[in-house]
Image: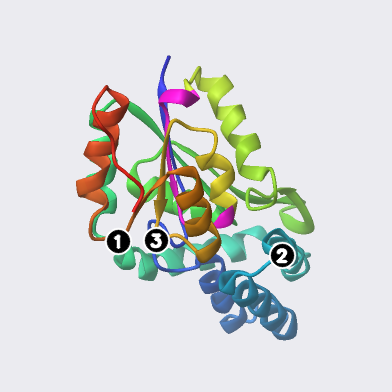
């Protein structure tokens, strides 16, 4: 069976929250209501700060995104997303492309799974040569967003559902698969694979990683730790949790 490598995006491959950058661009262009945009950015900030009700904060973000995009023409958002990524792509962490080459050399099918808007996730995946990706998706009618959320990977159970879908579709062994993320929503995926890696984890994820014995890395040592982790899967000693 194949091995899957599931990567988070915001805070894992880039320091940015791409949804926030996209909404700021939409506001600057007058595409969306400024007050609704500011409410959305406030929800994103509360989510990024973390806290006891993590998934409640995620729900607030998605509700805000729905209100923001309702009635907006799809091409307006896609054009804004392209311009945002043209600027943000230079802030990808330096390890990202070498990490992808390492995973592909080991035979992993790489999947980008993000709670962020699919309009941004698609551009990042295309830039990085990743064919399999999932992101937050809004319903569209007559080339305008309705405001209804069709898929929200950041919600409780969202990423595990996607992981199970991909495992079935691509005949993947989860026990031999790899996942890396930085937030509490990523914990749901890390718990399902044999090779979990917490990247610069939030306090909630860091605490869970310690209790589960998951390895933790940062942008400076991930390329050193990953080969050792993969060697552990092949029968080596693996990497202890930091």
* Element type where label 1 sits in the image: loop
Give the x, y percent position of residue 7: 43, 45
Residue name at image x 25 percent, y 31 percent: 237
Q: Earlier in the sequence, mark 2 or mark 3?
A: 2
Which is nearer the N-term, disc 1 or disc 2?
A: 2
Q: Quadrant of residue 37?
A: bottom right
In 3D space, how far apart are the residues under numbered discs 1 and 3 (Cα atoms)?
Answer: 12 Å
Q: How many marks?
A: 3
Q: If the image is split into quadrants, where does the C terminus sit?
A: bottom left
240, 65: nearer the viewer: 240
Residue 193 in view (yes/no):
yes
Stretch in magenta: 174-184
Q: Position of residue 195 (x, y in %)?
A: 40, 35
Checking the image for residue 93, the label placed there is 1
Q: Residue at x 60, y 64 (%)?
A: 77
Q: Secondary structure at mark 3?
A: loop
Q: Are marks 2 and 3 in contact (CB under 8 Å)?
A: no
At 62% from the left and 72% from the top, the residue drawn is: 44
User: Residue at label 2?
Assistant: 53
Q: What colour scheme was applied to this rendering of the protein?
A: rainbow
Residue ID for mark 3: 200
């Amino acid at each position: 069976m194949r091995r899957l490598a599931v990567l988070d995006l915001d805070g894992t491959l880039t320091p940015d929250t791409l949804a926030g950058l996209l909404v700021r661009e939409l506001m600057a262009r007058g595409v969306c209501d400024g007050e609704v945009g500011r409410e959305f950015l406030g929800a994103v900030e509360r989510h990024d700060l973390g806290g006891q009700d993590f998934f409640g904060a995620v729900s607030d973000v998605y509700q805000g995104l729905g209100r923001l995009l309702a009635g907006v023409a799809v091409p307006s958002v896609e054009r804004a997303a392209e311009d945002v990524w043209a600027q943000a792509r230079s802030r990808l962490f330096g390890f990202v492309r070498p990490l992808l080459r390492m995973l592909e050399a080991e035979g992993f099918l790489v999947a980008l799974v993000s709670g962020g808007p699919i309009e941004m996730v698609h551009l990042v995946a295309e830039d990085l040569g990743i064919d399999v990706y999932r992101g937050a998706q809004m319903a569209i009618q007559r080339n305008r967003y309705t405001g209804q959320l069709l898929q929200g990977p950041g919600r409780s159970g969202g990423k595990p559902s996607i992981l199970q879908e991909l495992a079935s579709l691509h005949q993947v062994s989860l026990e031999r698969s790899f996942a890396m993320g930085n937030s509490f929503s990523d914990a749901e995926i890390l718990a399902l694979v044999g090779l979990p890696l917490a990247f610069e984890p939030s306090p909630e994820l860091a605490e869970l990683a310690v209790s589960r014995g998951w390895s933790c890395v940062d942008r400076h040592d991930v390329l050193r730790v990953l080969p050792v982790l993969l060697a552990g899967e092949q029968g080596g000693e693996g990497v202890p949790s930091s």
